[in-house]
Amino acid sequence: MGDAVAVWAVVVAAGSGERLGAEQPKAFVAFGEDPLVAASVAALDEHPAIDGIVLVVPEGWEERATFMCDEIGAGKVAVAVPGGASRSDSVALGVAEVPDAAALILVHDAARPNLPADLVDRVLAGFADGADGVVPGLPVADTVKRVDGAGRITETLPRAELRAVQTPQGFRADVLRRALAADDRASGTDCASLVERLGGDVRVVAGDPRCLKVTTRADLERALELRGDG
Ligand code: C5P
């Protein structure tokens, strides 16, 4: 993607992270010296292709988030806004703050603190031949089954065709805005699924195992171990 295209990032950090069992929201749990969310915000802030960042945080955490951005010198963060009930609601509230001049929007989970610069490069490079969206994905190691309500297997999915997708997920801004306008957006567990529903052309590029999502304490420790690797 050429430098002329304005690229903004929306970092969603408004989840409660109950499975982590911490007193504060997941994004503000300590990750080394800083809150978890600081790591991916810093990575995006340092990336030369990113022009601006919108941070979406739990209601009441906006000031703390702004202070944190000052502390880490993340000057590209334009605003920290409160999120919504679902991830998609939080993304929509963040995207609403992205200027119209942005041609591409990357949506990133604060729960993925390790964001290597070359992962952002791959997502942006994936737009070269006209995709609506580009998401990073990894091959799946386990065999994945579809089951019914009684736990009976109804299908074994062909593993070679499966990818576990990560963030940052990149989209043409107009397509993402349209996808987020859907009434049933809350049922989408990622942004790509909302764009897929519109019939959008979403591609998968190689993900990065370091960019794992922190859900449990063990994930947090694993993410810290992987930090700075490679
Ligand atoms: O809950 P889960 O780990 O899938 O959340 C993925 C990301 O979405 C996290 O970074 C979380 O903070 C964010 N999120 C949000 N608003 C919600 C729910 C999740 O910003 N209502």
Image (cartoon, rainbow, N blue to C red):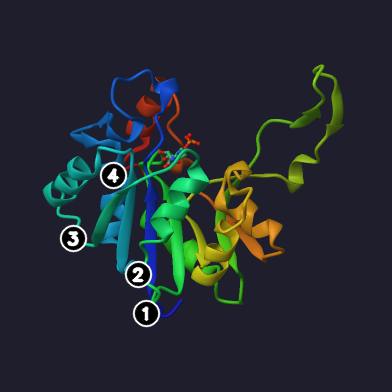
Find disc 2 in the rendering and name its residue: 49
Q: Where is residue 163 in the image (x, y as percent from the top left)?
A: 65, 46
Q: Where is residue 34 in the image (x, y as percent from the top left)?
A: 20, 36
Identify the residue at the far left of this view. 71
Q: Residue at horizontal 41%, vertical 41%?
A: 112
Q: Residues within 10 Å of mark 2 (few under 14, many from 20)?
A: many
| Of residues 103 and 116, the one drawn nearer to the viewer in this rendering | 103
User: Residue flagged by tag 3: what amino acid is it?
Assistant: Gly
User: Residue flagged by tag 4: what amino acid is it?
Assistant: Ala
What is the CA distance from the residue labelled 2 to the residue labelled 4? 17 Å
Q: Please say if the residues under marks 1 and 2 sit with CB atoms less than 8 Å apart.
A: yes
| Of residues 132 and 63, the one drawn nearer to the viewer in this rendering | 63
Query: Reading the chain from its start, which is encountered first: label 3 or label 2?
Result: 2
What is the CA distance from the residue labelled 1 to the residue labelled 3? 19 Å
For mark 3, give the secondary structure: loop
What is the CA distance from the residue labelled 1 to the residue labelled 4? 24 Å
| Of residues 147 and 179, the one drawn nearer to the viewer in this rendering | 179
Query: Reading the chain from its start, which is encountered first: label 1 or label 3?
Result: 1
Find disc 3 in the rendering and name its residue: 75
Picture disc at residue 3: 1
Query: Reading the chain from its start, which is encountered first: label 1 or label 2?
Result: 1
Q: Please say if the residues under marks 1 and 4 sit with CB atoms less than 8 Å apart.
A: no
Ligand 1 placement by image quarter: top left
Left or right relative to 35: residue 207: right
Find disc 4 in the rendering and name its residue: 39
What is the CA distance from the residue labelled 4 to the residue labelled 3? 14 Å
What is the CA distance from the residue labelled 1 to the residue labelled 2? 7 Å
- Depth check, mark 1 against mark 3: the one in front is 3
- Depth check, mark 4 against mark 3: the one in front is 3
For mark 4, give the secondary structure: helix
Picture disc at residue 63: none
Q: Position of residue 212 (x, y in %)?
A: 46, 38
